[in-house]
Amino acid sequence: MRRLFVLLAVAMMVVGLAGCGASQSGTQTGGITVRDPWVRAAMMNMAGDQSGAMGNMQQGTPMAGMGSDHSHGNEYGNTAVSAAYMVLVNNSSAADAIVKAESDVAKSVELHNVIMENNVMQMRPVEAIEVPANGQTELKPGGLHVMLIGLTRDLKEGDEVLIKLTTRSGKTIEVKAPVRKP
Ligand SMILES: [Cu+2]
């Protein structure tokens, strides 16, 4: 009887160690993790609103808007837009990248960067957001961001937005990002 207990205890230790080893190698090859995600608060346009005032308001004032990714009302017209920001951390020794983003709060989700062209800040879709080996990439206002185009609901301060990221290495990362005012 006593021998059985000893055997059981040994068996459990072995299983425990094996489990531990498995999860350790899992994080080593795990690549990208996300830190400090947040989404810019924004309101949906009201259906049938002809004035465009709502559209302008959500761009945030003042419109001079250096540092705002969304000072280009013409590009998306009255389509309500927002953006998600975060720090992508790569703890592995292999470079990786985010190649796709999805969320149910927007009809379309794109990876964007902000560039200067003719002294005007403009957003451009990018195919991937690179994250160097053992390094990090910051998504922040005025730079790289996850663009949410055609909001399906209001994004109010305190809400939580679920964003699904896909890495080039084939992993899916689920991010819960709180909504904040910039
Ligand atoms: Cu953008």
Image (cartoon, helix red, strand yellow):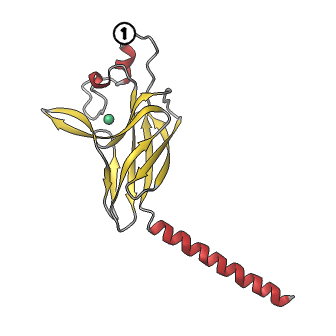
Q: Amino acid at mark 1?
A: Ser
Left or right: residue 177 versus residue 92 is: right
Note whether 92 is above or below 2 in the view shown.
above
* Percent coordinates x, y for residue 107 in the rendering: 44, 31
Q: Is residue 94 above or below residue 110?
A: below
Q: Quadrant of the C terminus?
A: top left
Q: Position of residue 128 (x, y in %)?
A: 31, 49
Q: Identify which residue, 155 or 22, lies in the foreground.
A: 22
Quarter holding residue 5: bottom right
Residue at 50% from the left image edge and 35% from the top image edge: 104
Q: Which residue is mark 1?
A: 51
Depth check, front residue: 39 or 14: 14
Please tell me in which quarter of the rendered image ligand 1 is found.
top left
Q: Secondary structure at mark 1?
A: loop
Residue lying farthest right? 1
Residue at the image position 55 percent from the left and 69 percent from the top? 23
User: Looking at the picture, does residue 37 appear above or below residue 41?
Assistant: below
Quarter of the image holding residue 85? top left
Q: Residue furthest bottom?
A: 3
Residue 157: x and y, percent?
49, 32
Quadrant containing the N terminus is bottom right
Query: Residue at the spot x=28%, y=27% of the render?
Result: 71
Residue drawn at the location 53% of the way across and 34% of the way down: 159
Q: Position of residue 163 (x, y in %)?
A: 47, 43
